[in-house]
Image (spheres, helix red, strand yellow):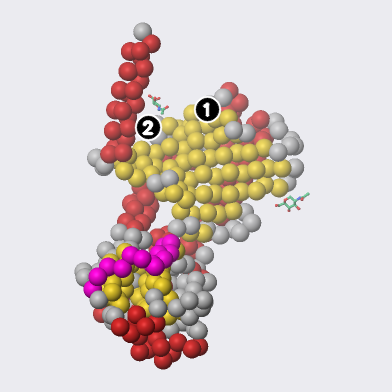
C-alpha cells in the first residue's frame, strides 16, 4: 500500500528529526582538497567547520592557517602562539597530503590530466558524552579509502585501493595515528572550540550611545548606538515621556568590524519643538539592566550645530561597565582609535577598555 509506506516514511523522518538535534551536539569537520593539474603542480586547500560553520582556512598559496570566525580569533588572546602552531601543523599535513596524491596517482597509474584528491575527517560529540569519528578519501569524486575507527585499519572502497593501502601505509601506522587522533585530540579541539564560540555568542556588551543633530536637508536628531552585542536592540524616541512614532526613521542594524553592532534612529523634528519639549532617545538592550535614556541636549545642539559635523550631545557613563567587561574577559587591551571602516561618531569615555574592539590586524596569522 503506497499510502501506508508514505506514512511510515513520514513517521521515520519525524523520529529522525526529533532525535537528531538532541543527540549530536557538536561537530568538527576538516576537508582537504588537492587539485593536481599537469605533472608537477598541486593546489592544496583545507577548510575546517565547526557545527557546520567554517572556522578555519588554509591553502598552498597563503600557507597560513586563518581564523574565519570572530570567536576563533579570540583563541590567540589566551594563546598567542596558537595560529603559528596551527600553521606549522597544516603545512606538515599539506606535505603529507601531496605525498598521498603522488601515491594514489602511482597506484592508479595516472600520468597527466587534472585530478582531485579529497579527504574529509572529523569528530562528533553527542549529548550523552559519546563520540564518533571518521576519515575518508575520495579520488576524482569517488570513494577511495576510509578509516575503520573500531579496528584502526583502512578499508578499500575500490579494488585498486587495496594495493595502494599496502604501499602507502604498510605497517598501518597512519591508520593508528588517525584512529587515536580522532578519538582524543579531535574531541579535545572540538570541546575547546565549543567553549570559545559559546563565550563569544553568549556575551553581552552594552552599547556606547550618543545623540547628535544633522542639519541638512531638514533638521533631524540622530540617536546612534554602537559596539553592542548581541544584535537585538530597541531604539525609540519619547517626547515629554510619551512614545513618538511619527517622523522616525529606524535604520538597519549594521555589523562593526569587531563583531559588535551599530544602529541609528533618526527623528525629524522642527527646531522650535526641541525648545518647547523634552525629547529623549531610549535604548533597550539585553546587556543593560535598565533602559538607557539620552536627553536631546537642545542647548548643545544649537550651539554646535553650524559646523555640520558629528556632534556628541550626551556622553554615556559606560566606564564602569566597560571595566567590568574587561575584567571578566581577563584582558586589558589598550585600543588606539583605528580606522574601522565603519562610521562612528566618537570613541567615548570607556571605549578604550572595550575588549571587543581588538582590531583584526592584531591577530597573528
Ligand atoms: C617540480 O617540483 C619540484 C619540487 O616542488 C621542483 O624542484 C622542480 O623544479 C619542479 N619541476 C618542474 C618541471 O616544474
Ligand atoms: C569496522 O571493522 C569491524 C570489524 O571488521 C566491522 O565489524 C565494522 O562493520 C567495520 N566498521 C565500518 C564502519 O566499516
158 relative to 131 in the view: left or right: right
At mark 1, the secondary structure is: strand
Mark 2 crowdedness (10 Å alpha carbons): few <14, some 14-19, many ≥20: few
Instruction: Give how far across and how far down residue 177 sits, in percent.
Output: 44, 43
260 relative to 103 in the view: left or right: left
In the rendered image of this protein, does residue 159 appear above or below residue 44?
Answer: above
Seen at 48% across and 62% down, the residue is 83
**Ligand 2 neighbours mark 2 (CB distance < 8 Å):** yes
**Residue at the limit of the structure toward the bottom, as seen here:** 303
Seen at 58% across and 23% down, the residue is 159
Seen at 39% across and 39% down, the residue is 133
In the rendered image of this protein, does residue 248 appear above or below residue 154?
Answer: below
Q: Dividing the picture into quarters, in which one does residue 282 lie?
A: bottom left
Q: Visible in this render: residue 348?
A: no
- Whether 119 is among the magenta residues is no
Q: Dividing the picture into quarters, in which one does residue 77 lie?
A: bottom left
Instruction: Give how far across and how far down residue 59 sits, in percent.
Output: 59, 53
Q: Dividing the picture into quarters, in which one does residue 226 lie?
A: bottom left
Asked if disc 2 and disc 1 are in contact, CB closer than 8 Å, the reply is: no
**Residue at the limit of the structure toward the top, as seen here:** 1
Q: Visible in this render: residue 46?
A: yes
Instruction: Give how far across and how far down residue 216 sits, in percent.
Output: 51, 78
Q: Which residue is mark 2?
A: 150
Q: Which mark is residue 35?
A: none
Towards the viewer: 117 or 222: 222
In the rendered image of this protein, does residue 226 appear above or below residue 171?
Answer: below
Between the C-alphas of marks 2 and 1, the distance is 15 Å
Magenta range: 241-253
Mark toward the start of the polypeptide (2 vs 1):
2
Instruction: Give how far across and how far down residue 330 sits, in percent.
Output: 30, 72
Q: Which residue is mark 1?
A: 156
96 relative to 50 in the view: left or right: right
Amino acid at each position: 500500500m503506497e499510502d501506508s509506506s508514505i506514512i511510515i516514511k513520514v513517521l521515520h523522518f519525524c523520529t529522525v528529526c526529533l532525535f537528531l538535534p538532541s543527540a549530536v551536539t557538536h561537530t568538527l569537520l576538516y576537508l582537504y582538497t588537492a587539485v593536481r593539474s599537469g605533472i608537477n603542480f598541486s593546489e592544496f586547500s583545507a577548510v575546517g567547520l565547526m557545527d557546520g560553520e567554517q572556522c578555519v582556512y588554509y591553502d598552498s598559496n597563503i600557507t597560513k592557517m586563518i581564523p574565519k570566525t570572530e570567536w576563533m580569533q579570540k583563541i590567540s588572546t589566551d594563546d598567542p602562539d596558537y595560529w603559528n602552531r596551527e600553521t606549522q601543523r597544516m603545512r606538515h599535513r599539506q606535505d603529507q597530503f601531496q605525498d598521498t596524491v603522488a601515491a594514489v596517482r602511482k597506484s592508479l597509474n595516472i600520468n597527466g590530466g587534472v585530478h582531485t584528491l579529497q579527504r574529509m575527517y572529523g569528530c562528533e560529540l553527542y549529548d550523552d558524552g559519546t563520540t564518533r569519528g571518521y576519515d575518508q578519501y575520495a579520488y576524482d569524486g569517488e570513494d577511495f579509502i576510509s578509516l575503520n575507527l573500531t579496528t584502526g585499519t583502512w578499508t578499500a572502497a575500490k579494488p585498486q585501493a587495496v594495493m595502494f593501502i599496502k604501499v602507502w601505509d604498510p605497517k598501518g601506522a597512519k591508520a593508528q595515528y588517525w584512529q587515536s587522533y580522532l578519538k582524543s585530540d579531535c574531541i579535545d579541539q572540538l570541546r575547546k572550540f565549543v567553549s570559545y564560540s559559546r563565550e563569544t555568542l553568549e556575551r553581552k556588551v552594552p552599547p556606547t550611545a550618543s545623540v547628535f543633530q544633522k542639519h541638512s536637508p531638514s533638521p533631524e536628531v540622530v540617536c546612534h548606538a554602537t559596539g553592542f552585542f548581541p544584535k537585538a536592540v530597541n531604539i525609540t524616541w519619547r517626547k515629554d515621556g510619551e512614545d513618538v512614532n511619527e517622523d522616525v526613521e529606524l535604520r538597519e542594524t549594521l555589523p562593526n568590524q569587531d563583531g559588535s553592532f551599530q544602529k541609528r534612529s533618526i527623528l525629524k523634528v522642527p527646531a522650535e519643538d526641541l525648545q518647547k519639549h523634552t525629547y529623549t532617545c531610549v535604548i533597550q538592550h539585553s546587556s543593560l539592566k535598565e533602559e538607557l535614556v539620552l536627553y536631546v541636549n537642545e542647548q548643545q545642539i544649537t550651539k554646535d550645530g553650524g559646523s555640520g559635523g558629528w556632534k556628541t550631545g550626551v556622553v554615556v557613563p559606560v566606564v564602569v561597565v566597560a571595566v567590568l567587561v574587561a575584567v571578566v574577559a581577563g584582558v586589558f587591551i589598550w585600543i588606539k582609535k583605528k580606522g574601522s571602516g565603519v562610521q562612528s561618531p566618537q570613541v567615548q569615555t570607556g571605549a578604550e577598555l572595550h575588549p571587543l574592539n581588538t582590531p583584526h590586524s592584531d591577530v597573528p596569522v
